[in-house]
Amino acid sequence: MPKRVLIVDDALFMRNTLRDIFSSAGFTVAGEADDGVQAVNLFRELKPDLVTMDIVMPYKSGIDATREIVQLDPSAVVVMCSALGQESLVMEAIEAGATDFIVKPFRGEDVLAVVKKVLGE
Amino acid sequence: MPSTSHKYLTLFVAEASEHLATLQSELVRLEQEPPAAPLWDAIFRRMHSVKGSAATLGFTRIVDIAHAAENLIARLKGKEGKIERAEVDLLFAATDALVKEIVKLDKKEEDESTITLVDRLAKAAQALPDPALSARPVPPPPVMPTADPSLPRLDVSVVLSKTCAAPGARALIVQRKLKAMGTLLEMEPTPAQLMQQKGGARIAALLATLTATDEVREALVALPEVEQVEVRIAPAARPVEEGRPLPPPPVPIVSPPQASMRGQATPPLVRGLTPPPVDADELRPEPTVRVRAEALDQLLDQAADVMHGIARLREAAKRLPEHVAARLDGDIDRLRRTARELHGRVMSARLTPFSSLTERLPRAVRDLAHRLEKTIELDVQGADVELDRTVIEALGDPLSHLVRNAADHGLEDPQTRERAGKPPRGKLTLTARRERDKVIVEVQDDGRGMDAAALRRKAVKSAAMTQEAADALSDDAAYELAFLPGVSTRDDATEVSGRGVGLDAVQRKVESLGGKASIRSVPGKGTTFVLELPLSVSMANLLLVQVGGELYGVPLHRVLLTTEYDLSARGGEGFDARSLVVMGELVRAYGLAKLFGLPSLAPPGPRPFVVMEVDGLRFAVSVDRLVGQEEAVLKPLFPPLDRVRGLSGITVLGNGRPLLVLDPRGLAELCGIHETSKPAPAAKGAA
C-alpha cells in the first residue's frame, strides 16, 4: 500500500513541487489544502499517513492546524515545511505536536529522507 | 536543484507577481491608517510566500531581499508608535527590487544594489526590537528535574548534521525523543541556545532511564539530521548535581509535562493570523481554480469558431430543398442557442475584477503625491465590479493617465487648497459600478475644476474650431474640448503628465472598446471623468461593406443610415469631400477607398454611402457595395495593424476569412472632420 500524503501550503507552486516529489517516490497524494482550516478538514476526511504543513498561511496558521490535527489523532505524522529564519515558529510547531520539519529550500531527496525516517521506513 | 522545480517557474512568477502587486496596496495602507495586526500579517505572509517558493527554486537574491524585508516587517509589527515614512519606503524598495528580480529571473550575476538593499533592510530591522525574542513566553521558573536515584543514568551524545538548517528545532526533537524514554536531567546546549546557529552541533545529555542503551541509540539514530549517536552508562557514583560543568544559571530542561506541549502562548505573529471570534470556515472563499488567461482566450476563440461554423451551416441549409431545410432549421437553431450560451459562459469566465486595475494605483498615487508635494487620498470603490479581460487590459493606460492627470492638474497643492477653504489633503475617487450591460468608471477629484474659457481659447488657437463656434458652447460642452488633440488645460508641461495630457488618446481608447468618455466639472469643486464601458467588447453587430475588393465591418451602433447617391452626376470623378443631403441636413461625404489609399472598383454612377455619427457629428463614407450584416466576435488588432488609424479590431467571418473592423472616430479624424466642421460637440451630462 503506498503511503498517502496530504500537502498543505498556500502557494500553488510549493504544492505542485511537493506533489511531484511525493508522486515520483511512489506516494499517493491524497489531498492538497491551501490554508489551515482546509488542512484540518481534509485531515479529518482523508486520514492520511503523512501531512506536510506550511507554517504561515491565511485563515489558520500551520501551527494551529497542527495542534488541532494532533488533538484529533495523537499518532498523526505532521512534517512542517518552514522557510529559513523561522526556527522559533518551527520549535513552536514541534511543541504543538509536529513530528518533524523540513526547511526550504529543500531538494526532493531531503524531503524524502525526512519523511521516510519519520514514517519508520 | 530538482528539475521538477523549473516546471513550475511560470507558476512561481505568476503567484509572486500577484503577491507583490497586492503587497504594494497594502504598504500604502500602512501609511494611511493605523496598521492593525491582520494587515501586518497579510504583508508578512506575502513576503514570506515569495521567499519560500524562491528558495525552492534557488533564487538566492529574491530570498535574500524577501528574507531581510520579512525581518523588518516582523519588527515593524511589534513597534509601538508611528511607522516612519523611511521604513515604508524601504519596504517599497524591497517590493520593487523583487518585482525587478522576478521579471529578469534568468540573470545570474550578483547585483550590487541587492546587497545594499539587503543591508539597509537589515540595518532598519536591527534598529527595532526582535518580537520573536521579546514576545516569546517567559520561561517557567527553573525546575530541577529529579529522578529516582536507583535508575541508571545514561550519558548521551548526539551530533547533528552539518547541513541541518534549524539546529534549535532539531535539538527540540531530540529533546522530545529523550524525554519520551526517561527523565532528562541535563541537556547542553539547549534547543534555545542552538537557535540561529549553523549545523554540526554536538549535544550532550544525561538521561535517567530503564531503557537499554541500544534502544536509546536506535531511537535517536532514526531521527532525521542526526549523524552520530553515543550512549553510555554514566558512572553511577557521580551525583547528578555535580557532574560535568553546567552553564550557570541552570537552564530548565524538563518543564511540567504538559505545559510545553499544549496551551503555550503563541508569538503574536502567528496568533494574529487566526482571528479567534470569527469562524474561519465562513471566511473561506469559494473554491476556485487558476486558469491561464491564454487558455480562456483559446476557449473563447473556439466558442466563436463553433458559432461561425453554425452560421455557415445555416447558409448551406438554405440551399437545400425546403422540406429538408425545415427539419434542419430547428436543429441548427437549438445548436446555435447552445453555442451562444457556451460563448456567454466563456465570456463570463473571462470577467476580471476592477481591482486588478486599481491595485497598483495606491502605490502610483503615493509616489506621485510625494513627487508633486501634494497630499492625496485615493479612494477606490467598486473594486469587485467585473469587466471582460480585454476591457480591463485596454483600460490600464487610460485609467492611469486620468489618475496622473487628476493628481497633477486637477488637485491643488495643500497651501492653495487651504486658501480656498478646502482640506489640505486632496481626494481622488475611483468608482466602478454596473449599470445594465455597461460598467461606469469614474475618476473624480475635488480639485480646482476645469477652466472653460481657457479650453475655448485653446481650441480656437489649435484651429480645432472657430471663435464663434467656441463662444457658442455652454461651459459643460466646453469641458469636452479637453478631449480634442492638442487642447490642454494648462500651458506648462510637467514631468508627471506632460503637455496636452493626451486626453484624446484616452477617449480614443475608450471608444475603440465601444465605450464613451465624458467630462463633468465644477470650477473650484473638482472634475469627474466618466467612462462608460461595455461589459464585454467581443460581440458586435457589424455592417459589412466592400471596398477595393475587400470586406470591412462597420460597428452598427455608429451607423445612422445607409443611402445611395450619385456624386459623379454632380461634378465629375475624383471627389475628396462633397456633401449629401441626409434627413434634410447637409453631410460631408468621403470616399472610403480614398481614405485608405485603396482602388475603388465600383463603376461610375450611384454609390452606396454609410452615414455615421461620432460626437453628434455626422459624416458619410462611400463604399463599393453594401454586403450585409453579421454578429461577430471582435478581437483586438495586433501590431502593426493596431497603429493604423481608422481600424478598431479584427474578426473572422463565417467563411473563415479575416475581416477588419472600422473605427468611426478614427475615420472622422482621417477625414479631418474636427478641423473643418462647425457644429459643437453635444454637451453630455450636467455637472
Image (cartoon, coloured by chain):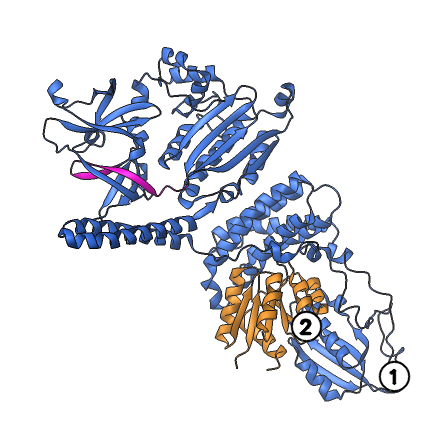
Chain colours: A orange, B blue
Q: Which residues are magenta?
A: B535-553
Quadrant for residue A60, please give it: bottom right
- In the depicted structure, whether residue B112 falls above or below residue B238: above
Instruction: Report if residue B410 is visible in the image.
Output: yes
Q: Secondary structure at mark 2?
A: loop
Rate crowding at label 1 as few (under 14), some (14 to 19) or many (20 or more) other CA atoms within 10 Å.
few
Asked if both marks, 2 and 1, belong to the same chain, the answer given is yes
Tell me the residue that label 2 is attached to: B200
Q: Is mark 2 in CB contact (under 8 Å) with mark 1?
A: no
Q: Amino acid at mark 1?
A: Asp
Quadrant for residue B262, please give it: bottom right
Q: Nearer the viewer, residue B122 or B278?
A: B278
Disc 2 or 1, which lies upstream in sequence?
1
Q: Amino acid at mark 2?
A: Gly
Chain under numbered label 2: B
- In the depicted structure, whether residue B112 falls above or below residue A48: above
Spot occupied by residue B404 in the image (x, y as percentages of width and height):
51, 32
Residue sitting at x 27%, y 38% = B542
Q: Quadrant of the C terminus of chain A?
A: bottom right
Q: Nearer the viewer, residue B343 or B570?
A: B343
- In the depicted structure, whether residue B274 falls above or below residue A73: above
Tell me the residue that label 1 is attached to: B148
> Would residue B194 appear left or right of B391 to someone viewing this image?
right
Q: Secondary structure at mark 1?
A: loop
> Would residue B381 appear left or right of B632 to someone viewing this image?
right
Q: Is residue B488 located in the magenta-colored stretch of the structure?
A: no
Chain under numbered label 1: B
Residue sitting at x 25%, y 55% = B331
